[in-house]
Image (spheres, rainbow, N blue to C red):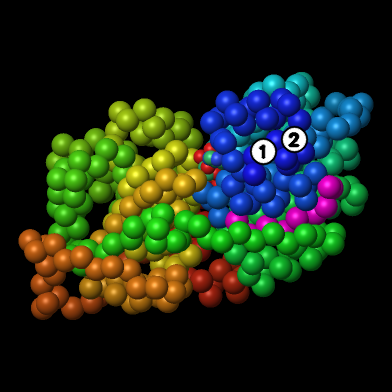
Amino acid sequence: MSFHTLGLSKPLLKAVSQEGYSEPTPIQKKAIPVVLEGRDVLAAAQTGTGKTAGFTLPLLEKLSQSHPKMKQKQIRALVLTPTRELAAQVAQSVKTYGAHMPYRSAVIFGGVGINPQLSALRKGVEIVIATPGRLLDIASQKCIDFSALEVLILDEADRMLDMGFIHDIKKLMKMMPQKRQTLLFSATFSPEIKKLASGLLHNPKTIEVARENTTAEQISQVVHHVDKSRKRELLSQLIKTKKWEQVLVFTRTKHGANRLTKQLEESGIKAAAIHGNKSQGARTKALADFKARKIGVLVATDIAARGIDIDQLPHVVNYELPNVPEDYVHRIGRTGRAGEKGEAVSLVCVDEHKLLYGIEKFIGSKIEKVDIEAFRPDPSIKPEPIQNGSNSRRRKRTGGSRSASHGGSNRQRSANRR
Ligand code: AMP
C-alpha cells in the first residue's frame, strides 16, 4: 500500500516523499482514513511506530478542506504533549509535513520566555502544539481563543496522566467547543486512559497496532550482570571495544546522569546529560550535538528522553533499570525505529534483580543474559535497597493516591519535568 491510496492531497504526498517514506506504517494505514472521515480516535501506539505522521498528515489534510475566517487569537488545531521535547518534535513534524501548505504553527511550553509564544499567537496561527501547564497559563490570560477549534489531539496521553496534567487538561477542555474532532494517542489503554477517553471522545474508533518495538527481530536485547561499582568501567569498555558511535544511556536520576557524564568525559568519551534540571537551551544543544555526532553518548533520565526523535539510533543502554517496567519498553523503543535494527543493553547489578524480573514479566519473555568474564559479579555482594536520588520534592498536581501508590517513579517524573 502506498500513501497515494490514503486520501492525502498532493502537497502532503510531496512532503512525505521528500522525507523518503515509501510506505505508510501500520498506525498510519489505520489512522489516516479514520481521521479523514472526521471520526474521533482512541489509538494505542508507541513512539517509533510513526504515530506523529499518523495524526499530523490527516490533520493537515482536514484543515485544507475548509477555509474559515479566523478572528485574532483563534486557532484551528491543538496538539497537547507531555514534554517540551515532544512538543518541539511534533512542531517540527507539522513543519516538515506541512512544508507545501500555508499553515502557520506555534509551539508553547514552559521553561522558556512566554513573550515570543504570545507574539506568535497574536500574529495568528492555525495549529498550536503545547504542553498543558504553559498553555493553561496563556489561556487563563485570554491570549488564545479555542472557540474555532476543529481538532484536538492528545499525544502520549498516558504520560500526561502520569505527570499529573489531568487537572490542567480538564480546565483546558472546558474552554473548548463541544463540537470538535478529538484524537487520543497513548502507549497503553489503562483504566485511567479509558476514563479520560470516555469523557473526551465521541463514539471513537479504537486503533491498536502491535508493539513493533518490543519484538525480538527488531531490537536485540541483552543483559550483562555486573557489580554496581563496575558499571561505569564496563560501559566505557563496551563503547570503546564495540566502537559504538551513538549511544543513548539511561540513568534513574538526574544526579546519576550528571555523575556518569562526568566520568565518561574523564575516560575520554564525549558525553552530555539531558534531564529536567538542564535549561531548554542546554537540552537542545546536547541533542543537536548528539545528532551532529559531536558527542557520542547522551545520558538521559526517562522523562527527558521521552519523545527525543533521533533517526536510527542503534544503541540504547540501561545503565540502571527503570523502576517501572513500562519505562523499559519506552527506553528500548528509542532504538530499532521504523524498521531499523537496534540493540538494547542493560547493565544489571544485584540490587536490580527484582526489577529485571518485573520487566521480563511485563514484556512476556526472558531477556538473554551474556556474561562478560572480566566483569562477573562478586557473589559475596548482597542486594541493597535502590536509591532514587534526592528528587523527592513533589508538585502539588502530582499528589493524590495514584502518584502515592506509584512511589518513586512518579516523584522522579514530576521532578524531572521541571
Ligand atoms: P514516531 O513514532 O512518530 O515518533 O516516528 C518514528 C520515526 O519514524 C520518525 O523518525 C519518523 O520520521 C519515521 N517515520 C514515520 N513514518 C514513516 C514511514 N511511513 N516510513 C518510514 N519512516 C517513517
Q: Residue at x 54, y 31 (%)?
A: 20
| Amino acid under disc 2 | Leu
Asked whether the residues under the numbered discs 2 and 1 touch, taking CB atoms below 8 Å apart as contact, a structural biologist would say yes
Bounds of the magenta segment: 37-45
Q: Is residue 8 visible?
A: yes
Marker disc for residue 3: 1
Horizontal and vertical percent position of residue 198? 79, 66
Mark 1 surroundings: few (<14), some (14-19) or many (≥20) residues within 10 A: many
The residue positioned farthest toward the front in the image shown: 1
In reply to whether residue 39 is colored magenta, the answer given is yes
Q: Quadrant of residue 21?
A: top right
Q: Residue at x 56, y 69 (%)?
A: 403
Mark 2 surroundings: few (<14), some (14-19) or many (≥20) residues within 10 A: some
Q: Is residue 60 above or below residue 32?
A: above
* Of 83 and 216, the residue lying toward us: 216
- Looking at the rendered image, the quarter that the N terminus falls into is top right
Q: Tell me the residue that label 2 is attached to.
A: 8
Q: What is the distance, in whole Å, between disc 2 and disc 1 at their CAs?
A: 7 Å
Horizontal and vertical percent position of residue 205? 77, 59
Q: Is residue 385 visible?
A: no
